[in-house]
Structure formats: structure tokens, C-alpha cells
Amino acid sequence: MIEIQMRKYDVYKYQEDFVIEQEIQEGCIVHADQKRMEQVFNNFMINAINYSGKNKHIIVRVKRHDDKVRTEVQDFGEGIPEEKLKDIWDRYYKIDKEHVRPSQGSGIGLAIVKQVLDLHGFQYGVNSKVNEGSTFWFEIPLVKDSEGSMAE
Ligand SMILES: Nc1ncnc2c1ncn2[C@@H]1O[C@H](COP(=O)(O)OP(=O)(O)OP(=O)(O)O)[C@@H](O)[C@H]1O
Ligand SMILES: [Mg+2]
């Protein structure tokens, strides 16, 4: 069973005026490697923070999606050009090395995410529009919902 730990992002709210909204559907139970899923989620969150630009608004969603639980991290930042979307999951790939917010990033975050999610066979992806922002998501098979009904 996975629990999302949001408290570690409070520092960005208090020190950098980020608004981090949560839309969490209760009672979605999955079995997965907590540490690995946290690593995936954290990469999405830190990217959202780093590439938010001036619009420091982030929405985290966890919701049931058919027989899966879908986790989304949406930002309203710089977005990603369509022709770059397939490259961002590659090791050491960075779109622009001169970000407004200096990040220490080496371009391996999403390569690790890809490796972890591929190994688990979980689906993932991103929707993005330049200057409008990005939504990174991944899906974990649902074990059961709060009513106790099993997913087929
Ligand atoms: N939310 C996002 N908005 C805009 N661009 C993004 C976002 N997330 C990732 N990218 C782009 O994809 C590239 C690869 O991301 P990745 O997380 O792998 O590396 P990084 O953030 O540059 O460095 P690291 O994660 O290793 O610290 C980034 O350099 C950035 O250009
Ligand atoms: Mg990163």
C-alpha cells in the first residue's frame, strides 16, 4: 500500500510561495514498492518546481482510472515542445541548460523514472504545451477500492 508523503514539499510553499493543490481520491489501494514510487513521484514534483517559472502553481491528483490508480503532477510552467517529448526520458537529456531557476540537474531524473516504471510494467507519460505547462502521470494497477471491491 502506497501513501503519498506531501509534507516534504511544504518548504517550497513557505519559502518560495508555491501553491501546491491536492486532489486525492480516498481509498485507492495499490500494492507497489513504496520507495520506488516515491522516487518517481518526487522526480515529477521536483521537475514541476524547477520548471514552473513564474507560475508557482502545482496540482497533484490521485484518482481511480478504470482498474488503475493514476497519479498526476501538473505544473503551469514553460512546457515542453512536442518534438522534444520523446527525448526527455533519455539519460542526460536537458532541453535548455540555462533555466531561469538554476537547477543542479544532470538530466537523469526522468531516465530513472522510466527505468523504474518500465521494470514494474506501469504506464506513464506526459501531456505538455509550451508556455502552458505539463502534466506528468503514472498508473499503478488498483488492488481494491474503499468499498472493498476488487478490480478485475
Ligand atoms: N515539468 C517540466 N516542465 C518542463 N520541462 C521539463 C519538466 N520536467 C522535465 N522537463 C525537461 O526534461 C528534461 C529532463 O528531465 P530530468 O528530470 O530527466 O532531468 P533534470 O531535471 O534536468 O535533471 P535531474 O532530474 O537529473 O536533476 C529537463 O532538463 C527539462 O528540460
Ligand atoms: Mg529532474
Image (cartoon, helix red, strand yellow):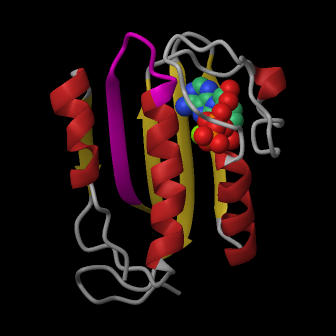
Can you give x and y, in whole percent of width and height, for residue 45 in the image?
A: 44, 43
Residue at the spot x=38%, y=10% of the render?
54
| Farthest left residue in view | 14
Q: Quadrant of residue 59?
A: top left
Between 101 and 60, the residue placed more toward the observer is 101
114 left or right, relative to 64: right
Q: Quadrant of residue 63?
A: bottom left
- Seen in the picture, residue 122 relative to 29 is either above or below; the reply is above
Q: Which residues are magenta?
A: 50-63
Residue 133 belongs to the span the image colors magenta: no
- Seen in the picture, residue 76 relative to 142 is either above or below; the reply is above
| Farthest front residue in view | 104
- Seen in the picture, residue 120 relative to 101 is either above or below; the reply is below
Between 152 and 79, the residue placed more toward the observer is 79
Residue 58 belongs to the span the image colors magenta: yes
Can you give x and y, in whole percent of width and height, for residue 20 in the image?
A: 26, 35
Residue at the spot x=74%, y=63% of the render?
115
Residue at the spot x=25%, y=23% of the render?
16
121 left or right, relative to 126: right
Quarter of the image with the N terminus in it: bottom left
Between 129 and 115, the residue placed more toward the observer is 115
1 left or right, relative to 146: right
Can you give x and y, in whole percent of width and height, for residue 53 in the image?
A: 45, 14
Task: State whether residue 128 appears in this view.
Answer: yes
Ligand 2 falls in quadrant: top right
Residue at the spot x=28%, y=61% of the render?
5
- Seen in the picture, residue 125 relative to 53 is either above or below; the reply is below
Can you give x and y, in whole percent of width and height, for residue 85 in the image?
A: 76, 31
149 left or right, relative to 136: left
